[in-house]
Amino acid sequence: MYKNKAVQEWVEEMARLTKPDKICWLEGTEEERQRLTEEALATGELIQLDQGKMPGCVLHRTAVNDVARVEHLTFICTPTREEAGPTNNWMAPAEAYSKLGKIFDGSMRGRVMYVIPYLMGPPGSSFSRVGIELTDSIYVVLNMGIMTRMGRVAMEHLGDGDDFNRGLHCTADKDPDRRFICHFPQDNTIWSVGSGYGGNVLLGKKCLALRIASYMGRHEGWLAEHMLIVGVEDPEGNVAYIAAAFPSACGKTNLALLRPPETFPGYKVWTVGDDIAWMRIGEDGRLWAINPEAGIFGVVPGTSYKTNPNAMQMIQKDTIFTNVVLTPEGTVWWEGMDDNPPKHGFDWQGRPWAPESGKPGAQANSRFTTPLRQVPTLSPEWDNPQGVPISAIVFGGRRAKVAPLVYESFNWEHGVYVGATMASETTAAATHDVGVVRRDPMAMLPFCGYNMGQYFHHWLEMGRRMEKPPQIFHVNWFRQNGDGGYLWPGYGENLRVLKWIIDRCRGKIGARETPIGYVPHANDFDLSGLNLTPAVIQELSKIDREAWQEEWRAQGEFLKKFGDDLPAELRREYQSLGERIKME
Ligand code: OXD
Ligand code: MN
């Protein structure tokens, strides 16, 4: 149906391998979406929610063993192990094609192969990239329809060319022993088999927009990052854009959709993206960013009118829910939504469930998929083919101790060091122990498609090429007092931290120099309307020398991993930090 020869030939080749009964080429129309939704409702792949209360909303349940990204089954298949680096699982390309080829062989027998052309980024933008995903799952098709610009628009962007990502996905038997997510950066190819969970199968997202794109970015001189993008508008109407990286499930979506609290009027926050940023150096020497996605695949538990009112508003219609509680009214519920759980309902596995059981009803990594156009605070610039200019890059993590509320790095090189050594207590977005401190450079540990030592080199090089690089900051909303209580109210109030960051970028306020960077002066951090004294900012900005010595040693241990690939600049930053802490 589409004329592109390279696409046709590749689809035929993959069909010879997977042997579907039928091939269905997608156009991305509303009629097509409705037809596929009906089909999935008929087979039980989707469950209809009450269309009066939640129009256009459906529920999907994944297999019990298939609820998160599987980092141990995710591979970077570069010709040499060295190219994948010490933080990725590596498999030789020939071995991966052969091993997965055996699983894919005949895997779509009796099934339909859907051909999903999709565009990451605005149509007509030089940032944008085309992918074609082949899948046997309607759930994947419908999610990709929300998360990307799907169908004809992508084929038009591609034209007659053959520069497209070749993504093959088959749900197969969901046997974790036959589950692999393999990336072939040199071939612009992704093969994913044995899973039906979003992060493993919506190939435009983590697989293309981060792992493959980071590799492309290094070769072509741009950055693909695990970052939200927001614009902050001050009372005078000036907008500054911030890109921020946090590990999975650390509140990126909350920050991206932040609603200014009543205690802090006059400011507006504009959402450009909540998960991924592609950034290029503009002719003006600044860094410009787009969000390659068109939807949000957000973590559900903990989302509430208190934590994220904009998200709550936007997920009342045209949303796919995955692994949440189904109520008898045909609506959905999850832990942390409100204090009114249904008296009974069905848990994420579809079993009768009541809150008294004491067991969670929603899966810890349950998700919503919603089009960006439903975001109440969507930036008018979200679709701008040029992107938006970035004033500040913010790294952050979930740390009960050590990291202050906010600090600014001394310069780009130091900022890269701060990003390279950032750490966070783990969450449920991937299958591993929850709550242990894990170093996660730039929040890209699971998403960098090549050797991370080389990735640090690339960041440093980008800094050298920019005339006006963004300033780099680090934040931690999660610092606790001695009793385990949070010192900072978080959520909407985080806007105050963004304001401080922007004021610093505009050279409007001073700061206190510490061994780790610049922290706010307690009395020029805006606490107006908040029942907190400047002393709390002092407490939140305290640099505990012993804790930092320990932290510095742990950073050194981590950096050793990269051996000779670690840039000399970061080695120097490490030495200087050690000396500054000692002298404190
Ligand atoms: C996500 C993740 O789904 O980071 O965004 O895991
Ligand atoms: Mn993410």
Image: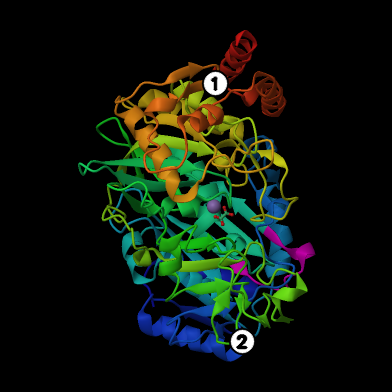
- Marks 1 & 2, CB-CB < 8 Å contact: no
Image quadrant of ligand 1? bottom right
Mark 1 burial class by Cα count in 10 Å: few <14, some 14-19, many 20+: many
Q: Which stretch did the figure color magenta?
A: 169-180
Circle 1: residue type: Ile
Q: Is residue 466 left or right of residue 447?
A: left
Quarter in which the C terminus is drawn = top right
The reply to whether the residue tagged 2 has its Cβ within 8 angstroms of ligand 1 is: no
Q: Position of residue 535 (x, y in %)?
A: 50, 29
Q: Which mark is residue 44?
A: 2
Q: Is residue 198 left or right of residue 2?
A: right
Residue 195, placed above or below residue 50: above
Q: Name the residue that disc number 1 marks.
A: 516
Q: Residue furthest bottom?
A: 42
Q: Is residue 67 left or right of residue 314?
A: right
Between the residue at mark 1 and the residue at mark 2, the CA separation in whole angstroms equals 54 Å
Q: Position of residue 490 (x, y in %)?
A: 50, 46
Residue lying at 31% horizontally and 54% vertically, measured from the top left:
382
